[in-house]
Amino acid sequence: MDENPPAFPVRTMAWAMAAVALALTLVGVLVQVRIPAEWQPHPPLTPDFGVALTFPLTGAFLLSQRPRLSVAWLIWVGGLLGSGNVAFTALMFHWASQGDMGAAATARAVQLTCWAVSGLLLAVMVPLHSPTGRLPSRGWRVVLAAGAVATAAEVVLGLLRPDPDPVGYPWPAVIHNPLQVRALLPYYATVWDVLQYVIQACVVAALASLALRLRRADPVTRRQIAWPLSVFAVYVALYLLGPAMWLPATLWTALIPFAILFAALRYRLYGIDTVISRTFVTAGLLGAISAVYFGAGAVSSLVVSGYHQVGGLVAALFAGAFFQPLRRVLQRVVDRALYGRVGDPALLAERLTHEVRRADPADALASVVTVVREGLAVDGVAVEIADGRPRYVESGQVGPSPREVPLVWHGEPVGRLLVGPPGARRFAAAHDDRVLSTLLPYVADVAHAVRMAADLQRSRERILAAREEERRRLRRDLHDGLGQTLGAMAMTINMARINLSTSPGTADDLLRDLRVGMDAVAGDIRELVYGLRPPALDDLGLEGAVRALAEETLPAGTDGVEGVSVRVDGELAGLPAAVEVAVYRIVQEALNNVRRHARATRVEVRVTRLPAGNGGGELRVTVTDDGIGPPARLRAGVGMSSMRERAAELGGSCVVTAPGTGGTVVEARFPLTA
């Protein structure tokens, strides 16, 4: 179908005739209001008023956008005929009340033709041709032909109607039909009823054609059909209930062209599936809760007769208990019906669980992103993980301005979920929110696992790098320092042996130099050992080593420092060697920072061992000063990073804070296993 804008005359004609239709409708309303009460139509308000008010305008607008869409022409022409029906019905009764029966009979013929043809166009042909403008298949031509034949027969029969008996006539006088055929009088009512049944069957069949289109359509066309199908279904139900429901039918009929307009032009922007979903869930909840409430109330009133307050309380409790489980069940049913397996949040969660179980975190993340993209029916989904490996995983294309959803694992932000624009198989926003609320915990778990795997890998790399660096240092110190010294000492011994018998004085000098060299070697060995583990830990224990370190680093009077207070709570014996070294180095680095930058007067070092009920515990180390505090924008240097890494290697943490009272607090925590 050509969707280019129409030529100017076509647009002008469409809007001009729509204006004429509105004028006819206004004339009909004004004339009907002034008709005497005994000549008022019965009932005064019919669905044709809804047709006359909205169909001409929406048809003209649709023609201005899609001039070759047959549904647009059907709506436009049907609306014009509906306006003619309203106007000439009012004129018929007006002229009849004035005694001009000839004009009333002519108006009746025009009204009958407009009413019948408008009904055929709007109630049968529009559903059959929605939304593409073509019939679903050639087999539906039978319905179209049956409706056309029944409508034509209805018009002919109405034009040949014999004058009814004045005794049962609802108006003061019979509007004489100059074309009447008196021979039809015994059969007129029966034939008219048969034709009405045939037309009703055609209307129901046209609705069924929309339902079959919906079932067999692709996801895009399915959303396009959902709007007209929903409004036509309600209209057909009201239509079959008869004149008793014509007031709501009139109001509902006025909404039909807007639904078709959305389907034809902008169906992607309106969530009809959300409307259907919420309507279904709400109706199911109301029905079920009402049944439970009244059932529980009836049973309790029989069991505890005379205690109506108790019965009401029991009924309310039962209804409240069933509300949330029933809502979830109904929502899942409607999700399966509207979106199939790919859009059911529960099935998506089950699929995610399966994907996560069978792959490592990095591979599982790629599968999770794909599942989320399919569940949301968007062009792309990506996950961005802070400090993760990989840091960014994308499925599809999220575009330049994706929707950002934070990923939070037990209160800790672990990354972002980026959702791209809706795809061709777009789902409603309410459905997407249900999918996101269901799947976000799984995505956050996988993102956290990716972060933990990356942290573990980085820890392994740091441990390996530290080990190799330590080996390199030992090799360098042994080769360049201790090795060279020992080599020189060996040469000195050889020279002393040579000169021992011939020149004892020279030999004595060489041995004296050898003694000095041995002292240097001993010092080098002590430095090597100290680099591996501070000897004060073995000599004094952790408490004594920390006290000695404090006195050595910040003795009283150094740069205005009054001294370092060391406090130990709990037993420090039996701690792992790695924990002792980490505590010693962290305290050493913290005290060096105080001496270099803090300008403090008081410093406190506190080491606390906290017991735990499960046999483990925690070792907490705090270094507090009253100095100037850290800068506003703290940049982690080598020393700061070293403290944090030493704590992290043992599963602990190290943080530097500035309390409100001033100064700096360095706090490190180490978990202790039994």
Image (cartoon, rainbow, N blue to C red):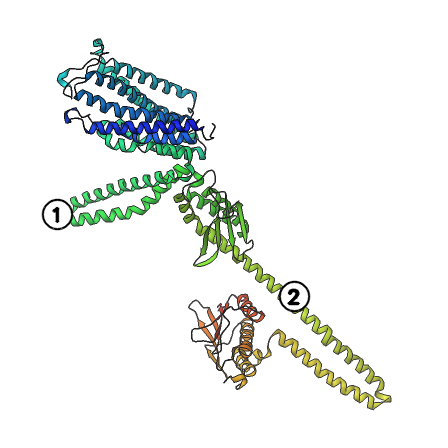
Mark 1 — residue? 306
Q: Position of residue 466 (x, y in %)?
A: 62, 66
Q: Is residue 407 above or below residue 247?
A: below
The answer to whether residue 493 is left or right of residue 227 is right
The quadrant where residue 192 appears:
top left
Circle 1: element type = loop
Q: Which corner quadrant of the image does residue 280 belong to?
A: top left
| Residue identifier under label 2 | 468
Q: Position of residue 130 (x, y in %)?
A: 40, 28
Residue 66: x %, y % from top left: 43, 30
Q: Position of residue 351 (x, y in %)?
A: 47, 44
Q: Earlier in the sequence, mark 2 or mark 1?
A: 1
Q: Residue at position x 30%, y 29% from top?
A: 22
Q: How many labels, in total?
A: 2
| Amino acid at pointer 1 | Gly
Asked if residue 45 shows in the view, the reply is no
